[in-house]
Image (tube, rainbow, N blue to C red):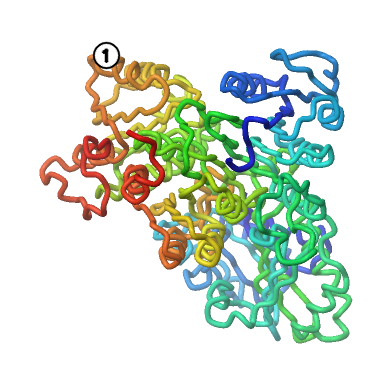
């Protein structure tokens, strides 16, 4: 789960981390005068609250010297559609705008606590060169990045925080406040079951005070059972369709293509998308109905896939293991009857009782195409959405079997 | 031989009396696995599926000589179960549970890191070259995995047993049904498997690819390995480095997620492209540079392995 900047800063404040004086978030320009008053005298900074970095360049961070300027900025920003380098071409609608008092900046520092998958423990990542994209810095100047491994229970030790402070060139008289800051940051990471707690930038003001100017928190969905306060927050990452899928225990992620995919198992679902692309098509979604897909799940999955108007064909790829293929075939048939399928359906079943399953599909009288391998299914799905040029969208054979017969050789 | 499990493996099922534990333990028993004990606190002294149930792992191990733990305990309690199994002295812990918090796994890995490994369970060349004790401990596989199977001998997991066939190809994978797909293709080509290991789809796993590849390299029955990876993390890149430096057995790889969008978790908690790292391209090119055959088309895995290894690995067809 990703938190917005203002949510992260509220959490920072409860842990004693200094943040800029805030006027809160506004969702309407009429709330602006109150927010400006609360944030104290100007100038102010107005920041679009969206779950993506690169807001500054996209016009999502603006400074206003006067209330009139602030009003003009707020009018343009509330409800604006924003595309940044992190939104992958999609526009995010700005629903909330954070109003902060402007801070004077002497220096900018990057600091974050992240989960180090390789080291299997949390790690502090910091750089004296803050305010930039850390991935870019890691590429261009890896020696400028400091890493301090943490204990997953104890967080950061004071000596580790002091060592970091000296390497980052924190003013000596602010040593104590930096240690408190770093300790709080690690504590938030552990207390919230986070996978990332980032402050970029942490600034040093002309008065040598430390202030967290921005904040980002990403938490571990697996830990929501013990993070009640997080579990209550709205899920801002998922689309309506994705939320609907989540509710019925289906893992769905919408994509840009036109071939809807229904698969059991996350790895196989990803591989199915890849195979569709390899055959020259574009998957409309990632969908994992779960390892033990039932007829009800299959019906629910069909409804979700078909709710996407881009879908022009549906590919079902189920490897029946514990759940037998004839049971799955039954589920597919029931679902197809219920949802009144109007696009071509390609079904590939494999595994336990596969013959009975295929037989059921064949005898059903329903208009569907059976496939014997995933490659066969992907090709059939692609030609279903490109009727004119046979296989015209295919990129190239790359050593894969060209037909099911060949695959069986 | 095989790795991790053989016909003599004695399994204690944690959470035997729960729905998932009951269902899958039954399948394991039907496959021929020796399930010797169950573990459900408070139900000690009873029988379930004809197996004695114990209150603690210590009791179960002492009474039955169980040496493999198979865990079906719900996420909030699973990390504790892993530690309990390790403390009771089993050699291999297979944790099926999906949804364990990552910080719990970080703590588990740290707690396991200091334990001495039972000599018999330690087939890897880790401790070679001196008196230094082996770096690893009790072998944990998973969580969030389908388990481990040594075809024809022992199944400790949720995979359909019949798709497997005894043989000489080792399989190691981060995925479930994707593994079944690959195994099914191998079996279809007459290529049996020595052992199939699902290491799981979480960001921190008990065993990574390299841990299992070391075991396959040391196992005389394994003549080739199929590695099934996915986007996220750097485990495939580390495996590539190990294979290049240490392995002389041929390795075939498939990496899922070439078309996955960055920043979205693709089902598995560990399958996510973050900050430009963990991409399919990075993994495929690292593996190719290490001389590994990377198969782009999932449907071609069995065929590709057969073309190279057919004579060495296949039974008479």
Around disc 1, counting alpha carbons within 10 Å, would you say few (fewer than 14), some (14 to 19), or many (20 or more)? few
x and y, in percent, of residue B36 in the image: 73, 23
Q: Nearer the viewer, residue A226 or B234?
A: B234
Q: Which residue appears at 22% of the width and 14% of the height? A: A365
Q: Nearer the viewer, residue B42 or A218?
A: B42
A388 sits to left or right of B204 = left
The residue that mark 1 highlights is A364
Q: Residue furthest left?
A: A388
Can the viewer see residue A241 in this picture? Answer: no
A58 sits to left or right of A225 = left
Q: Is residue A337 above or below residue A160?
A: above
Number of marks present in the image shown = 1
Q: Nearer the viewer, residue B32 or A367?
A: B32
Q: Which residue appears at 46% of the width and 35% of the height? A: B180
x and y, in percent, of residue B277 in the image: 52, 64
Q: Is residue B278 above or below residue B265?
A: below
Q: Is residue A46 above or below residue A14?
A: below
Q: Nearer the viewer, residue A107 or A345?
A: A345
| Quadrant in which residue A35 is drawn | bottom right
SS class, disc 1: loop
Can the viewer see residue B67 in this picture? Answer: yes
The C terminus of chain A - image quarter: top left
Q: Is residue B214 above or below residue B267?
A: below
Q: Which residue appears at 74% of the width and 37% of the height? A: B78
């Amino acid at each position: 789960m990703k938190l917005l900047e203002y949510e992260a800063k509220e959490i920072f404040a409860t842990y004693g981390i200094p943040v800029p004086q805030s006027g809160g978030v506004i969702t309407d320009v009429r709330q602006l005068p109150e927010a400006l008053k609360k944030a104290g005298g100007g100038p102010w900074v107005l920041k679009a609250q969206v779950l993506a970095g690169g807001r500054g360049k996209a016009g999502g961070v603006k400074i206003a010297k006067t209330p009139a300027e602030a009003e003009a900025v707020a009018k343009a920003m509330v409800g604006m559609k924003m595309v940044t380098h992190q939104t992958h071409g999609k526009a995010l609608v700005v629903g909330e705008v954070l109003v902060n008092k402007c801070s004077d900046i002497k220096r900018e520092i990057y600091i974050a606590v992240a989960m180090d998958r390789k080291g299997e423990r949390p790690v502090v990542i910091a750089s004296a060169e803050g305010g930039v994209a850390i991935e870019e810095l890691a590429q261009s100047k890896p020696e400028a990045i400091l890493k301090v491994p943490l204990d997953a229970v104890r967080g950061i030790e004071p000596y580790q925080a002091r060592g970091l402070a000296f390497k980052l060139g924190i003013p000596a008289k602010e040593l104590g406040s930096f240690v408190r800051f770093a300790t709080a940051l690690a504590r938030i990471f552990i207390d919230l079951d986070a996978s990332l707690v980032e402050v970029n930038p942490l600034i040093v003001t002309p008065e040598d005070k430390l202030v967290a100017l921005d904040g980002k928190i990403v938490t571990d969905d697996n830990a929501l059972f013990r993070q009640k306060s997080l579990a209550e927050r709205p899920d801002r990452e998922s689309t309506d369709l994705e939320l609907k899928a989540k509710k019925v225990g289906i893992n769905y992620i919408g994509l840009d293509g036109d071939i809807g995919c229904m698969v059991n198992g996350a790895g196989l679902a990803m591989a199915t998308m890849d195979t569709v692309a390899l055959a020259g098509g574009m998957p409309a979604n990632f969908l994992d109905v779960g390892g033990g897909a039932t007829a009800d799940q299959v019906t629910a999955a069909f409804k979700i896939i078909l709710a996407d108007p881009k879908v022009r064909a549906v590919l079902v790829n189920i490897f029946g293991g514990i759940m037998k293929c004839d049971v799955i075939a039954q589920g597919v048939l029931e679902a197809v009857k219920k949802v009144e399928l109007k696009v071509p359906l390609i079904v590939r079943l494999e595994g336990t009782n596969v013959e009975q399953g295929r037989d059921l599909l064949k005898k059903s009288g329903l208009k569907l195409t059976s496939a014997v391998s995933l490659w066969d299914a992907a090709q059939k799905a692609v030609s279903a959405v490109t009727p004119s040029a046979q296989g015209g969208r295919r990129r190239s054979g790359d050593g894969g079997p060209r037909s099911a017969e060949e695959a069986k050789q | 031989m095989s790795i991790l499990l053989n016909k003599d493996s004695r399994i204690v099922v944690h959470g035997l009396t729960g729905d998932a534990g009951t269902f899958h333990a039954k399948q394991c028993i039907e496959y021929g696995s020796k399930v010797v004990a169950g573990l459900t606190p408070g139900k000690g002294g009873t029988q379930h599926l004809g197996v004695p149930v114990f209150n603690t792992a210590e009791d179960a191990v002492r009474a039955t000589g169980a040496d493999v733990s198979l865990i079906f305990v719900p996420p909030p309690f699973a990390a504790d179960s892993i530690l309990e199994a390790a403390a009771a002295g089993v050699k291999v812990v297979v944790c099926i549970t999906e949804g364990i918090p990552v910080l719990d796994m970080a703590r588990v890995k740290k707690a396991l890191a200091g334990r001495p490994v039972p000599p018999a369970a330690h087939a890897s060349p880790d401790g070679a070259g001196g008196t230094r004790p082996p770096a690893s401990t009790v072998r944990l596989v998973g969580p969030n995995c389908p388990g481990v199977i040594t075809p024809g001998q022992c199944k400790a997991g949720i995979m359909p047993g019949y798709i497997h066939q005894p043989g000489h190809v080792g399989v190691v994978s981060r995925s479930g049904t994707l593994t079944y797909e690959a195994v099914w293709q191998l079996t279809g080509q007459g290529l049996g498997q020595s052992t199939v290991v699902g290491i799981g789809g979480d960001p921190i796993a008990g065993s990574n690819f390299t841990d299992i590849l070391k075991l396959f390299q040391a196992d005389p029955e394994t003549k080739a390995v199929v590695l099934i990876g996915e986007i996220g993390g750097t485990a495939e890149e580390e495996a590539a480095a190990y294979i290049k430096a240490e392995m002389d057995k041929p390795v075939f790889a498939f990496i899922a997620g070439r078309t996955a969008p960055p920043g979205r978790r693709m089902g598995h908690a560990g399958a996510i492209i973050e900050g430009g790292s963990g991409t399919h391209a990075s993994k495929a090119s690292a593996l190719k540079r290490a001389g590994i055959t990377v198969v782009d088309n999932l449907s071609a895995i069995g065929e590709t392995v057969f073309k190279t290894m057919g004579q060495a690995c296949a039974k008479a067809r």
